Image (spheres, helix red, strand yellow):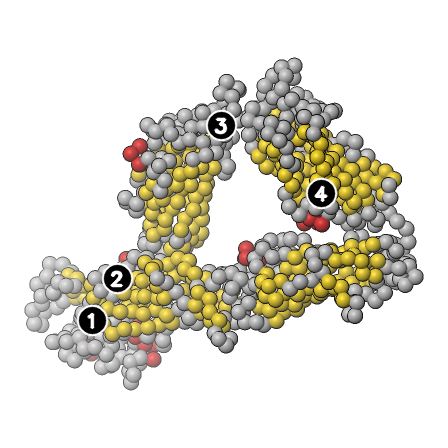
Amino acid sequence: MTGPATALAGAQQNYTVQWACSSVTDPCLDAQIAIPLPTAVYPTDPVYEVASTYVNASAASGGWAPAPTVANGVMTWTFTPELPAGTSGEFSFSIQQPQGMTPNGSTVTPEATFTATDSPTVTASVTTTIQTLNGLEVVKTVPTPEPVRDTNVTYSIVASYPQTINEKGTWIGWPNQSPGWVQYENIVVQDPLPAGAVFVSASHGGTYDPATHTVTWPTIATGGANWVSRYTVTLNYPSGVFPADGDPANPSDAVVQPVMITGDEIGSGVPATAEGAATHGFGLTSSASGSLTKGPNWFPAHVVSAGATGNIYQIGYRNAGNVPLEFHIEDILPCQWTSPDHASCETPFLTNVSLNGSSTTVADQEWTVTFTSNTGVTQTLEWTGAATLQLPVAAGEYVTKIVLDGTVRPGVSATINVNGLLPREVPIGDAAEPAPYQQPKLHEAWPLDLNGRVVVENCLSNSSISANGAVIARPNTCGQVAVSPLMESVRLSKSISNNAQAPGGVMTVRWNLNNTTPWAVDPEAPRSLDGLLSPVAVDLLPANMEYVEGSFTMRSPNVLPNEYLNLEVIENWNGTGRTLLRASWPDYAGYSNSSYAWMNFQVRIREGAEVGTYQNTMGIYNGDVDYTSSVFNTCTGTRVLDMDDLDGDGVTNEYRCEASAPYTVLGQGAISISKEVKGSEDPDYLASPSVGLINPGAGGSYRVNVTNTGNVPLTHVVAYDILPRPGDVGVGPAAGQERLSEWTAMLNRAVNAGEGATVSYSTAVEPCRGEVITQGAAMTAAPAGCTNDWSTTPPSPITSVT
């Protein structure tokens, strides 16, 4: 068995097992190779263990065993009942260690056991050491380059893993998105404050100790994959203690604000420590600067569907100065095409309204939220931005106006999302407005052809930014979204399990079809739908895949019944050498709105498939809809013109939705060798178990066929042939077994091996042939006491060759 010496935690570990039926006469009966999924072991007391996860495995080369069964934590390859004597080959398998749970330095040792009813048990193993890349990370940032003395200064602290945050404390991804991460326990964040600084407050339970002048936050038991801790600490710098030079480029008044984090690696208990710091000077004067925006600010960047729900508009705010700013934000929600100049609306564009923050800093921001309904009822709520705020209204009411008031500290830049439900039919309202689906020309820059979309504008009004009660700006800004008409819609996805296989290996393909067509509220309204689809699903298999006959299975027959299924398997589709699968339900009209269907089938990697990673793509059509119209852009995937007519309806200017899934063809070295005999009484060459016939003293010949049956090039290929004689033994691993030959065959002419092969001859009773007795060994390594007299020059007489 061969495998990696080291591997990152969570990375795929690939192993190869070489096997052989080491016999000269008898087959290996009922042979199996079993490999229990190993555990990662760390030598603590008691030992810390983590189970490995199965990823995939290939069939045995030469077709002698299919891909393994995996049951009760054991991979088992079951070979053909009679594995011929001398047969050899290999297979591969892949495992991985769970992300976050496997400490650095753990070892994994898979062990393979070969058994057969007439053979001794043989084992092989290899050890891999698991490595991790991360420790802990903590970042402290100052809100502005030069805060002002004698005012409160609030610092932000972010604690997590190096894979999660960068040196600025910005989120860059979850740690388990790439291999090498392990989680930590007993995590503590501490902030030793500068001498002379006055502690004001700390968020999230931070406790100030006057004796050490340090803030300590509560211990985090375990930092999981989603762990990010965000704190703030507020200080005041008395002008009588701290000087100020107002020179941020060359400060002589710099103060260093350190922060530290400690924790223990899970499983091993190995401690980790990290430090961060914020360094700054002090400004001589106050600076009040801020901004307020409404988005999205250009319709192509934000297109939503009628009847959609979710984030529709965004309010962005920023304090770019060094003093706190008071923000007053008024948002009258759209009525028909744009925000009205009053707070009432008979035909709202947005209902079921809620607010949430899309930036981490918004969670620390306190807001007073006042909102008005269409009945004139006004409510006031306090909100910190840490969670979604649903604006509660009575049945039949909806929000028409939102007012937010809050004081934003220096350095904060964040966004508030305005979420809600769009009407099913757009536009709405009185007939004096433009006709349905005719775009009003709100701005000269907007294109005239919007593919049936309507742009709806939302503007802030009567908003202001103030410092110490004095207004410094009155930003009134607008955002626009383009709304697509109600239309047929499908969500399509595809996956492949056991998606890394060598030739002969089997994978399982899964199609997922979700009818996401919204129901129309008014069946008489423009573009109303009945919500029904008539799906036609197609999958043109890549050339290196073949369909496993009879494997197509409907996993949701209550949605798309089996009795209506029309499955076509078209080999060599259009002369491409590829197989097309086409599934349809032509006489079924019940695939309704919000229905989810899935099905799977198996594919086999063809012999000789080249090593590499590929994509397998499926498509879906709606058999009842003309997809040539540009308004029916209904895919939650890729929309492709049906130029190749995969659905077979003869129409090539329609569209289909597509989804793809990757798979990998693994390299598998395999070689087969066969030997045939032709005696003086035989008309042609014969292979085992046939027996050649030759008269004493007459001539005969052997023919040896060596074939690369794998999908990777082979180098240093060596084949040995020991001529029969009484008392002879096996050539390869069975070198210790007698072959029971009854007479001697003598070579009578030089061997013709063909182009590219070199033939050597030996006259020894026991010639060296270590390469085939022990894989990877030198020629002279075996058998013990062998003679190395190999020569490319035939001896004289040539009959002395053994």
Indicate the amino acid at tag 3: Trp
**Residue at the image position 56 percent from the left and 28 percent from the top:** 306
Instruction: Give the crowd class for mark 4: few <14, some 14-19, many >=20 residues within 10 Å.
Output: few
First-in-chain label (4 vs 2): 2
First-in-chain label (1 vs 3): 1
Helix or strand or loop: what does disc 1 sit on?
A: loop
Q: Are marks 2 and 1 in contact (CB under 8 Å)?
A: no
Which label sits in the foreground, 4 or 1? Answer: 4
Rendered-image quadrant of the N terminus: bottom left
- Residue behind mark 3: 519
- How far is the residue under mark 4 from the one under mark 2? 70 Å
- How far is the residue under mark 1 from the one under mark 3? 68 Å
- Residue behind mark 4: 382
Q: Position of residue 666 (x, y in %)?
A: 40, 57
- Residue behind mark 2: 79
**Residue at the image position 82 percent from the left and 34 percent from the top:** 474
Q: Are marks 3 and 2 in contact (CB under 8 Å)?
A: no
- How far is the residue under mark 4 from the one under mark 3? 36 Å
First-in-chain label (4 vs 3): 4
- How far is the residue under mark 4 from the one under mark 1? 79 Å
Decide which of 297, 523 is in the foreground and name it: 523
Q: Give the farthest residue toward the right.
A: 240
Q: Position of residue 327 (x, y in %)?
A: 79, 40
Helix or strand or loop: what does disc 2 sit on?
A: loop
- How far is the residue under mark 3 from the one under mark 2? 55 Å
Rendered-image quadrant of the C terminus: bottom left
